[in-house]
Structure formats: C-alpha cells, structure tokens
C-alpha cells in the first residue's frame, strides 16, 4: 500500500477528492483501483514534499548568509 487514507487528519481538498474517486474507504482499503489517479495522487504528494524541502533549504541558506555577513563584516 502506497498510502493510508485517514479522514481524521487534515487533508488537502484535491487529495481528498482523489481519494474519493479512487475509492479508498476509511479503513485504508482500496475498493476500486485506477492506476492513473493513484499515480497522480502520489506524484502530487511527492511534489508538495519536494517544494516544502526546497522552501526550507532556501530559508536556512539565506539565514546562514545573513549571519555570516554580520559575523565577518563587522558592521
């Protein structure tokens, strides 16, 4: 199983709709299977995770740059 559907967690609206179209019930069991939609939902989740990691890395690198500027520039 690539993922488990848990209705108690907060889900994005389009992922919730994709889960309903695929036919995943509340126990996490897939009733009807459409491989294209399943691959799309997994790709969307992976893309969101990747963009989240990129945002965090950009923020941390800019923070380190500012700290280094103040540390070495003697402003």
Image (spheres, rainbow, N blue to C red):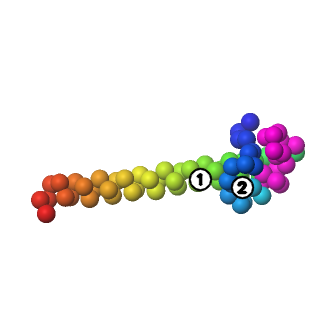
Mark 2 surroundings: few (<14), some (14-19) or many (≥20) residues within 10 A: some
Residue 41 versus residue 8: which sits nearer the camera? Answer: 8
Residue 32, disc:
none
Give the alpha-carbon distance from disc 1 to disc 2, as whole Å: 13 Å
The residue under label 1 is: 47
Residue 15, disc:
2
What range is drawn magenta here? 18-31
Q: Give coordinates of residue 32: x percent, y percent.
A: 87, 45
Q: Earlier in the sequence, mark 1 or mark 2?
A: 2
Please tell me which residue is depicted at 39% across the width and 57% down the height of the picture: 59
Is residue 26 found inside the magenta-colored segment of the image?
yes
Please tell me which residue is depicted at 40% across the width and 56% down the height of the picture: 58
Q: Quadrant of residue 13?
A: bottom right
The answer to whether 6 appears left or right of 72 in the picture is right
Q: Residue furthest right?
A: 32
Q: Give coordinates of residue 6: x percent, y percent.
A: 74, 45
Is residue 33 at all visible to an observer of this figure? Answer: no
């Amino acid at each position: 199983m690539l993922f488990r559907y848990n209705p108690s967690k907060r889900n994005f609206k389009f992922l919730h709709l994709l889960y309903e179209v695929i036919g995943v019930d509340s126990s996490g069991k897939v009733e009807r299977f459409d491989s294209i939609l399943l691959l799309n939902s997994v790709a969307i989740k992976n893309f969101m995770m990747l963009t989240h990691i990129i945002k965090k890395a950009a923020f941390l690198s800019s923070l380190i740059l500012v700290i280094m500027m103040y540390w070495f520039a003697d402003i």
